[in-house]
């Protein structure tokens, strides 16, 4: 049976009340009996004392009638059972009342009162005295004469105990009745008091229960001002506080839940066996509705992660997991064991940070940096190579021009020139990869360029390959070197052709492309904006990822020996990057490859094409200052130009060039100025010469391609650009063009 | 003696003025008296006020007295008297009297402070007794309280005879032998206007007096007491002997004795003067008018 607080209180208090009642009643009865007895004894003492005074005269007189009268008078007092008078020799003078056979005890007149008790009576003995004056004068004077007290007899008064017993019985009966009434009454009162007192507790209990069920009801208890009332008030305050706190907790939990859901980390909670018991939105997006943690990992590795977490937790571990679409994802994983108070594992919690894209970007960046480094290397090599080739090619072409074709060495010289030209072409491709060599920037139509490429490709490609061209009309122009871009698109088409030895489909598409997706921007590493996209797609063999990673590296080729230089796509990459664009390759082995070129849109209109202009005969007179730190180039230039009647001044570096120019500025008609020189750059020399003679014609020359600042020099008056290495005809053509301006 | 007086002072805390007076008297007496023997020896308990008052009265009549207490002279008064060559001994009280009666007849014995004169065979002996003769009451009632026409005198037979209780027709006598008879006699008195109690030590116990007074008030019969104490306790009035006058009476008799008179020829007598005490409260309760003249005669009026 469930014992409520009220029952416990009643079971405790009622026995206490009964016990207290019994003890109090017993003590009260005992006290009252004692008081009753003492009262009777006291009254008896008084009666006896009075009797001892009253009986003085009768005893003095010895008159039997008076003795009897006095004895009856005393006996008439309540509770007096008998009265006896004795003379001073203890001879009984008279006895009235109940028979009393007891002998006289040993009495002393020194004791004013003697008390004896038996079962039925209290017996009191008192001496009877009379007072006499020792001198006759005493009868007249009361205060000075010595008095003589004389014992003249004894009085015995017996008091019945019946009245006392009746009183005691009455006291006992009344006490017991009162005890019963008190016990019963107090029990009833206590019952009601406890009921009243515990009623607020029941209300409190109900309120606590309701709070446990989530209902924050206010306790309505009359303001009693006592502890219960105070408790109710405090409870109500507590309820409000809890409600407020819970509201704040709910709000806080909502915020945390929102954060939990919004956060870009895939958060999960696991039970101790690795079962997934809680995830956020990102986890769902990333991993789907997977139920077991181990299912996220490739087979054979699923248990390792939790084992690590059990030991000390897994923190920022790079892992590969299976994504919601079955793809492999690279994530940073942290898993921590959740411990109870006994330090036993009750579960895990942790999160994934998806770094797949980041990894991809990193790899791209790494590839880009790698290609940039290779480009720089290739550019440097090409520059030096061009300087070397300038002498070989220049002198070969000069020698061939003065040697009759019938001469036996003409064939040798022609071979040298052709070899040097091939080498120069190779260097040119390297410069393209190194984003150099762009020197003829014009605003052109990409569709026209594509059509030009296709018209050439159609003539050279196998009939088993179907060419499809899809050009978007009214595309805005792009600004670039048409020769380089032509070469780039041509290379892509040639690669597509080579990828389809069994035939297939070559699909070329041009379109406007608005780049605004941040991820794509990050991936392409070009600014958002308007681009022209050129897609070259083949249905060829495609490329595996490992090949795809390396296709832009110079000298990497999958073609057989002698079939490719490995610089084609490297040059395309360099050209596109040099034009501020981006190149993207998508390839599926066995299905084909799509290469997309993104070229920034240019403002304005398409300019007239400059590529392929025909050199005309020009006037060949004047003084030319050739400034170049390469002796071979200086000597070659001098020999060619002097061979064609030009007066040539040479300077081995910038400072000398400026000095000579300053000394002969009135006679110098043209300056051929190398851009890359030690001490003072060609750009600085250009500016100084222009300052000395603003109208001076200057051809800028470089073993690299066209630099970005060349535009600035052209705007300031540069009249042409001479790419090393050059044949003597190219030099003469550039010089004559300049001189004719 | 001085030491004894000082002792008394300390023991009984006597009034200072009285002590001073007493000391002064003693010192004067001591130096005024010749150092040789005293003619008169007074034996009395000087701790009692009446004794001292009586002595003072004696001294008014005698020059040379020697005062001794009964305890001092017990068994040796004869020697002391011989040594002092005293010819007169004044015995105050029964104890002193009993001791004095053993003296040789040549020494006159004059006694006082006894209720009535005892039967004495000794020659040369006389005295003054304290009991007031009935006739004194009768004369007083007759003169000032005429509404009390009859007086019941209750006492022992001997005393009745000594005090001449039957001398007046206004008096009814009730002779009793015990206290019970005394109370019963008072209870039987119905026709008297007042009850006169005779001084009998054997009868008048405190209980007896209380019973008598209770009866007196129940019957509305006034009690004529024998002492100031009785008046104080409810008696209508009392005539008591004047101690100083008694002392003078004793002094006069002693003077006569010293001059050679035989005291055996002078019969014992009551006091010549009496002091009157009146309880006006009792008079009022009993409807008795006390005339102003009588009140003026009273030595003290109660309450």
Image: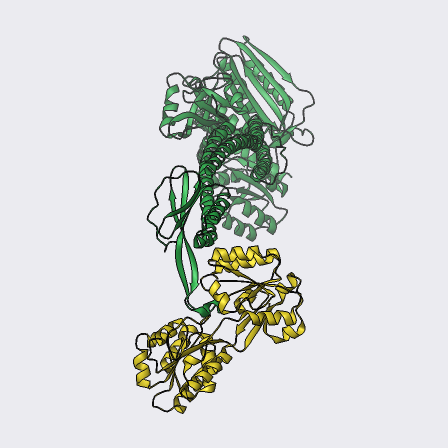
Chain colours: A green, B yellow
Q: Position of residue A408 (x, y in %)?
A: 42, 25
Residue at figure coordinates x 39%, y 51% from the top left: A87
- Image height of B187 relative to A293, above or below: below
Q: As rendered, which of B244 and A222 lies closer to the eye?
A: B244
Q: Position of residue A600 (x, y in %)?
A: 61, 29
Left or right relative to B23: residue B242: right
Q: Position of residue A462 (x, y in %)?
A: 53, 10
Quarter where residue A706 is shown? top right
Left or right relative to A737: residue A563: left
Q: Position of residue A16 (x, y in %)?
A: 46, 33
Any part of residue A163 in sight: yes
- Image height of A494 relative to A30, above or below: above
Q: As rendered, which of A480 and A390 lies closer to the eye?
A: A480
Q: As rendered, which of A609 and A151 lies closer to the eye?
A: A151
Q: How many marks?
A: 0
Q: As rendered, which of A718 and B74 lies closer to the eye?
A: B74
Any part of residue A424 in sight: no
Q: Quadrant of the C terminus of chain A?
A: top right
């Amino acid at each position: 049976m469930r014992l409520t607080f009220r029952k416990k209180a009643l079971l405790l208090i009622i026995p206490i009340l009964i016990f207290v009642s019994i003890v109090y009643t017993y003590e009260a009865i005992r006290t009252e009996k004692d008081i009753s007895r003492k009262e009777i004894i006291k009254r008896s003492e008084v009666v006896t004392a009075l009797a001892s005074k009253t009986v003085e005269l009768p005893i003095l007189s010895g008159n039997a009638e008076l003795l009897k009268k006095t004895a009856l008078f005393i006996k008439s007092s309540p509770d007096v059972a008998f009265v006896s008078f004795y003379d001073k020799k203890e001879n009984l003078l008279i006895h009235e009342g109940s028979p009393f056979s007891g002998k006289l005890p040993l009495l002393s007149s020194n004791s004013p009162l003697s008390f004896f008790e038996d079962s039925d009576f209290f017996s009191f003995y008192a001496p009877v005295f009379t007072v006499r004056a020792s001198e006759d004068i005493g009868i007249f004077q009361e205060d000075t004469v010595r008095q003589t007290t004389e014992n003249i007899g004894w009085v015995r008064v017996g008091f019945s105990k019946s009245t006392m017993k009746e009183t005691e019985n009455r006291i006992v009966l009344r006490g017991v009745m009162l005890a019963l009434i008190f016990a019963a009454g107090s029990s009833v009162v206590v019952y009601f008091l406890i009921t009243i007192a515990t009623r607020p507790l029941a209300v409190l209990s109900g309120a606590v229960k309701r709070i446990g069920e989530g209902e924050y009801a206010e306790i309505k208890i009359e303001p009693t001002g006592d502890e219960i009332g105070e408790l109710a008030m405090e409870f109500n305050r507590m309820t409000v506080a809890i409600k407020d706190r819970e509201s704040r907790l709910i709000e806080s939990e909502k915020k945390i839940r929102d954060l939990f859901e919004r956060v870009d980390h895939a958060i999960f909670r696991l039970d101790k066996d690795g079962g997934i018991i809680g995830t956020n939105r990102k986890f769902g997006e990333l991993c789907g509705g997977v139920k077991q943690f181990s299912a996220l990992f490739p087979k054979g590795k699923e248990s390792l992660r939790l084992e690590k977490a059990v030991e000390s937790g897994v923190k920022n571990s790079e892992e590969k997991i299976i994504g919601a679409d079955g793809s492999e994802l690279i994530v940073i994983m942290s898993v921590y064991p959740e411990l109870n108070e006994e330090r036993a594992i009750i579960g895990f919690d942790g999160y994934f940070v998806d770094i797949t894209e980041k990894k991809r970007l990193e790899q791209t960046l790494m590839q880009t940096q790698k290609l940039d480094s290779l480009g720089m290397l290739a550019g440097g090599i090409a520059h030096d190579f061009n300087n070397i080739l300038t002498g070989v090619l220049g002198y070969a072409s000069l020698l061939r021009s003065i040697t009759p074709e019938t001469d036996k060495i003409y064939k040798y010289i022609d071979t040298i020139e052709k070899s040097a030209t091939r080498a120069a072409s190779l260097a040119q491709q390297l410069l393209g990869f190194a984003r150099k060599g762009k020197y003829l920037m014009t605003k052109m139509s990409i569709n026209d360029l594509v059509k030009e490429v296709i018209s050439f490709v159609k003539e050279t490609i196998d009939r088993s390959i179907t060419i499809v061209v899809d050009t978007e009309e009214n595309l805005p122009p792009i600004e670039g070197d048409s020769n380089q871009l032509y070469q780039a698109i041509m290379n892509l088409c040639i690669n597509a052709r080579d990828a389809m030895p069994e035939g297939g489909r070559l699909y070329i598409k041009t379109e406007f492309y608005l780049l605004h997706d941040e991820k794509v921007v990050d991936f392409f590493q070009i600014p958002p904006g308007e681009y022209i996209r050129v897609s070259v797609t083949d249905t060829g063999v495609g490329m595996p990822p490992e090949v795809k990673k390396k296709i832009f590296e110079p000298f990497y080729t999958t073609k057989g020996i002698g079939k490719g230089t490995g610089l084609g796509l490297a040059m395309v990459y360099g050209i596109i990057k040099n034009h501020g664009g981006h190149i993207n390759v998508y390839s599926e082995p066995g299905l084909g490859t799509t290469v997309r070129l993104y070229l920034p849109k240019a403002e304005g209109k398409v300019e007239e094409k400059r590529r392929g202009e025909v050199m005309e005969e020009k006037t060949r007179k004047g003084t030319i200052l050739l400034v170049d730190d390469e002796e071979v180039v200086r000597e070659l230039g001098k020999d060619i130009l002097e061979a064609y009647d030009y007066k040539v001044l040479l300077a081995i570096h910038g400072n000398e060039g400026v000095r000579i120019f300053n000394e002969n500025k009135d006679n110098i008609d043209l300056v051929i100025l190398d851009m890359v020189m030690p001490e003072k750059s060609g750009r600085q020399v250009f500016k100084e010469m222009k300052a000395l003679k603003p109208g001076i014609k200057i051809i800028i020359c470089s073993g690299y391609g066209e630099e970005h600042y060349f535009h600035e020099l052209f705007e300031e008056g540069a009249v042409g650009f001479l790419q090393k290495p050059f044949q003597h005809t190219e030099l003469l053509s550039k010089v004559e063009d300049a001189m004719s301006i | 003696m001085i030491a004894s007086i000082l002792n008394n002072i300390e023991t009984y805390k006597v009034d200072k003025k009285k002590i001073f007076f007493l000391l002064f008297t003693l010192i004067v007496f001591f130096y005024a008296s010749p150092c040789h023997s005293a003619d008169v020896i007074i034996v009395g308990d000087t701790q009692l006020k009446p004794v001292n008052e009586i002595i003072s009265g004696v001294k008014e009549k005698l020059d040379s007295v020697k005062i001794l207490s009964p305890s001092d002279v017990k068994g040796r008064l004869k020697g002391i008297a011989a040594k002092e060559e005293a010819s007169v001994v004044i015995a105050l009280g029964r104890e002193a009297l009993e001791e004095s009666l053993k003296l040789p007849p040549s020494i006159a014995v004059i006694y006082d402070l006894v209720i009535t004169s005892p039967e004495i065979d000794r020659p040369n002996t006389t005295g003054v007794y304290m009991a007031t003769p009935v006739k004194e009451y009768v004369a007083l009632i007759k003169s000032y309280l005429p509404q009390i026409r009859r007086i019941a005198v209750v006492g022992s037979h001997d005393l009745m005879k000594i005090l001449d209780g039957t001398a007046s027709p206004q008096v009814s006598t009730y002779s009793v032998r015990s206290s019970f008879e005394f109370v019963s006699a008072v209870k039987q008195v119905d026709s008297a206007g007042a009850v006169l109690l005779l001084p009998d030590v054997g009868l008048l116990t405190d209980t007896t007096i209380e019973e008598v007074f209770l009866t007196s008030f129940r019957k509305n019969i006034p009690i004529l007491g024998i002492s100031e104490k009785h008046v104080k306790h409810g008696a209508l009035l009392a005539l008591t002997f004047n101690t100083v006058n008694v002392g003078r009476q004793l002094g006069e008799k002693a003077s006569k004795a010293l001059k050679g008179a035989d005291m055996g020829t002078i019969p014992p007598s009551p006091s010549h003067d009496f002091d009157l005490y009146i309880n006006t409260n009792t008079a009022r309760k009993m409807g008795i008018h006390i005339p102003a003249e009588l009140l003026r005669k009273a030595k003290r009026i109660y309450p």
